[in-house]
Image: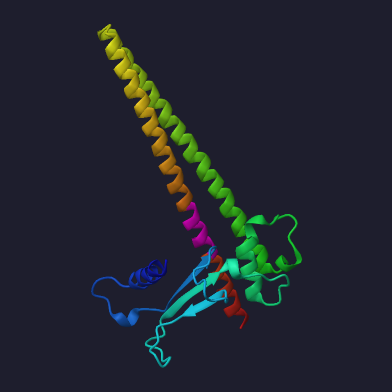
Amino acid sequence: MSSRIIYNWADIYSQQLKSGQDYGQLRPTYSIWLLAENLLAEDKDYAHHYKMRDDQGRAFNRHGGIWLLELNKFDASRIETEDQRWLKFFKDGEQLNDTALPDWMSTQEMKQAMNTLTTFSEKEQQYYQYQARQEYLHEQRSIQLEQRNIQLELEQTNSALLQERLEKEAAQRREEAAQRREVLALQEKQAALQEKEAALIEIEQLKVQLAAKNH
């Protein structure tokens, strides 16, 4: 995971430039990771900020950094700071009822964040419904084509052995199709998680922008 985090930061940072452009055009890049599972088991802190520094703590450059927020370690029964408010939202947002929000969600930023999360959830549900429908139609077309092929071969020969072989092949293809559906479902779940992470990062960026405006 640590290698993946560094690689993703470097990839985003490098995508700012195209071939031949000046390195002076590079701008700071901040990577924020919301981790549901603990990554640094030996460290009790839930927030970690990494920058590129030497052994004496001197910065090599100031072009951003990496934030790790281990939500599993965060436990705040009372919300006293704005950071705690956002962390609690990241941790418990999916369980909230958007029609009866708790007091700590009463700020305008939190309401907007909840609206974004609700919209994302609705789009996610619509996406899965569409994928399920497409998969069903594809399976039906495949089954119909398979049945026509079997019927054609059966009409061409009365061989019982051929019929048995064709049925076994059909059963094998159905099993392979079921396996492909399982792989597709897993890929869709992983894609949904990545999209959700992107949405939460967008919310955090919005918070930073709002905070900057207030200052």
Q: Which residues are magenta?
A: 192-200
Looking at this view, is 203 or 22 the one in front?
Answer: 203
For the C terminus, give its image quadrant: bottom right
Q: Residue at x 46, y 31 (%)?
A: 136
Seen as rendered, the residue at the extreme top is 158
Q: Going 43% across and 91% down the picture, which residue do you hit?
A: 57
x, y percentage for residue 201?
52, 66
Q: Residue at x 48, y 49 (%)?
A: 189
Horizontally, residue 185 falls left or right of residue 104, namely left
Magenta stretch: helix, strand or loop mostly: helix
Residue 75 coordinates in the image, percent (x, y): 66, 70
Q: Quadrant of the N terminus?
A: bottom left
Instruction: Kindly tell me whether residue 151 is visible in this rendering.
Output: yes
Residue 94, quarter of picture:
bottom right
x and y percent of residue 116 in the render? 59, 59
Q: Nearer the viewer, residue 104 or 214?
A: 104
Vertical position of residue 140 compared to residue 95: above or below: above
Q: Which one is in front, 152 or 42?
A: 42
